[in-house]
Image: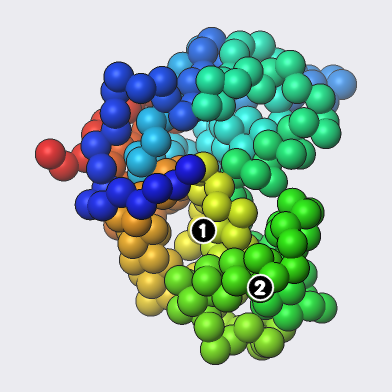
C-alpha cells in the first residue's frame, strides 16, 4: 500500500475506510474504580487523511490512539482495519498487525539509546523478517527521507531532540505502514524543531501517507485535513479543514 498520492488527496468516500470504529467503549478497571475513558465512539478514517486529535488532558486521546494502533483492545464495540476485524485477534495477531500496518511515533521518541540510529530504524524490519539486503535499502531510504542520511552511525544520545524524533519517524516508516500514528510528537521539542517535525509530517502527507496525530499544538492541527475533538471520552466535534 502507500502508493504515493499528491497534494494530500481527498479521501475516497466510496471505498471502505482504512479505519472503521463503531460504538467503541473503553473502561479501565483499576480494581476499586472504573474509568470510562471512551464512550460511544464512531470513527471512519479514509486512506490519505491527515487527522489531528485534540482535546483536554484526560479526554481519551491516548486511549483512542492505543486502540487504533492495536496496542490495546476495546471493552466493547467494533474496530475494522482495512475491513479486517481487530477485536477478536489474539496477541500474536495484534503484534503482527502493529508491525506491518502501523507506524508509531511517541512524544519521548522511544529510541534504544545503546544502538545506532541505523540499528534503531532497522529494528522493525528485523521483527518483520525482511531480508538483509532489503533492510539496508529501506533503512537508507527512510533515513534519507527524514534528512538523517549523514547521521546513521550516531547513537540517539548524539542527536538533537528534533533529530531523535526524525529517527523515530524513519523507524515508523521502515515497514511502509498503512497509518502513521503520533502521540504528541512535538511535545518534547522546542518550537523550532517542533516546526521542522510539523513540516516533515505535512510533507509525508503530501507523499500519500495516512496520518493521525494527537496534538496540543494548534499550529499543527491547523495544517491537517481533518480535526476531531474529544471531551470526556466522546468525540464532540469532527471538522474538515480547508476546501
Ligand atoms: N492504564 C490506565 N488505567 C487506568 N486509567 C487510565 C489508564 N490510562 C488512562 N486512564 C484514564 O483514562 C482517561 C483517559 O486517559 P488518556 O487516554 O490518557 O487521555 P489523554 O491522552 O487525552 O490525556 C483518564 O481519566 C485517565 O486517567
Ligand atoms: Mg495522552
User: Going by the image, does 31 lie left or right of 178?
Assistant: right
Residue positioned 75% across, 68% down in the render: 132
Residue positioned 68% across, 77% down in the render: 118
Image quadrant containing the C terminus: top left
Say whether residue 235 is visible: no
Q: Position of residue 97 (x, y in %)?
A: 68, 37
Q: Position of residue 31 (x, y in %)?
A: 87, 21
What is the secondary structure assignment of the residue under circle 1?
loop
Say whether residue 174 is visible: yes
Residue positioned 62% across, 37% down in the render: 69
**In this view, 150 is above or below 92:** below
| Nearer to the camera, 24 or 118 | 118
User: Going by the image, does 75 lie left or right of 59?
Assistant: right
User: Going by the image, does 3 lie left or right of 163?
Assistant: left
User: Going by the image, does 154 lie left or right of 113?
Assistant: left
| Nearer to the camera, 135 or 228 | 135
Q: Position of residue 112 (x, y in %)?
A: 77, 69
**In this view, 114 is above or below 179:** below
Residue carrying label 1: 185
Residue carrying label 2: 136
Amino acid at each position: 500500500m502507500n502508493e504515493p498520492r499528491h497534494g494530500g488527496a481527498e479521501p475516497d468516500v466510496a471505498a471502505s475506510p482504512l479505519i472503521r470504529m463503531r460504538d467503541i467503549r473503553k473502561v479501565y478497571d483499576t480494581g476499586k474504580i472504573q474509568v470510562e475513558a471512551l464512550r460511544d465512539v464512531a470513527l471512519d478514517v479514509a486512506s490519505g487523511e491527515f487527522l489531528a486529535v485534540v482535546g483536554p488532558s484526560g479526554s481519551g486521546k491516548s486511549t483512542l490512539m492505543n486502540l487504533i494502533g492495536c496496542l490495546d483492545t476495546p471493552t466493547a464495540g467494533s474496530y475494522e482495519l482495512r475491513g479486517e476485524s481487530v477485536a477478536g485477534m489474539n496477541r500474536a495477531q495484534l503484534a503482527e498487525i502493529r508491525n506491518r500496518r502501523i507506524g508509531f511515533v511517541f512524544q519521548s521518541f522511544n529510541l534504544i539509546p545503546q544502538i545506532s540510529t541505523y540499528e534503531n530504524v532497522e529494528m522493525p524490519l528485523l521483527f518483520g523478517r525482511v531480508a538483509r539486503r532489503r533492510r539496508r535499502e529501506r533503512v537508507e531510504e527512510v533515513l534519507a527521507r527524514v534528512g538523517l542520511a549523514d547521521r546513521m552511525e550516531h547513537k540517539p544520545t548524539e542527536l538533537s531532540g528534533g533529530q531523535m524524533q526524525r529517527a523515530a519517524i524513519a523507524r515508523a516508516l521502515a515497514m511502509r505502514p498503512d497509518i502513521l500514528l503520533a502521540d504528541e510528537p512535538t511535545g518534547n521539542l522546542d518550537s523550532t524543531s517542533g516546526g521542522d517535525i510539523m513540516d516533515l509530517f505535512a510533507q509525508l502527507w503530501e507523499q500519500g501517507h495516512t496520518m493521525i496525530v494527537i496534538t496540543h499544538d494548534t499550529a499543527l492541527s491547523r495544517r491537517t485535513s481533518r480535526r476531531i475533538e474529544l471531551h470526556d471520552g466522546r468525540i464532540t466535534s469532527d471538522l474538515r479543514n480547508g476546501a
